Amino acid sequence: MRYFIEKYNYDLARIRAENAGSYLTTNKKLDPGQLVVMSYGESVSVADNKTEAGRAKNRRIEILVYREAITVGSVQQATPGR
């Protein structure tokens, strides 16, 4: 059961991140080459998920915009833990 909850949260976070990226490239005309969309689900929380206030803080997006276009090799460097 835990697997399905984690998968659901990951998918929800991914959709939230993709929607934010789409908004930035479509409405704000950001170059898609300057944007990397990533999702972590529950794996990178900033607050305790046991409280409503903590869960609200974890429902977030973080945006990094690069001055230059990102190449395939540099995307791996931007991934945490590598």
Image (cartoon, rainbow, N blue to C red):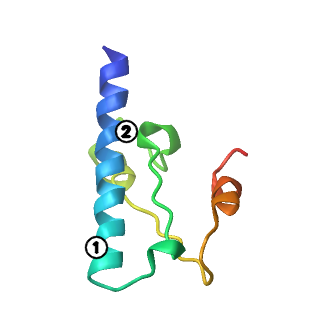
Horizontal and vertical percent position of residue 67? 61, 84
Name above or below for residue 62 compared with residue 82.
below
Mark 1 lies on residue = 23
Mark 1–mark 2 Cα distance, whole angstroms, equals 20 Å
Taking the spot 61% from the left edge, 70% from the top edge, the residue there is 70
| SS class, disc 2 | helix
**Mark 1, mark 2: which one is toward the viewer?**
1
Residue 78: quadrant of the picture? bottom right
Name above or below for residue 2 compared with residue 76.
above
Q: Amino acid at mark 1?
A: Tyr
Q: Amino acid at mark 2?
A: Tyr
Residue 6: quadrant of the picture? top left
Check residue 37 in the rendering and tell me which mark sits there, or answer none. none
Taking the spot 48% from the left edge, 45% from the top edge, the residue there is 45
| SS class, disc 1 | helix
71 horizontally vs 45: left or right:
right
Mark 2 lies on residue = 10
Q: Are marks 1 and 2 in contact (CB under 8 Å)?
A: no
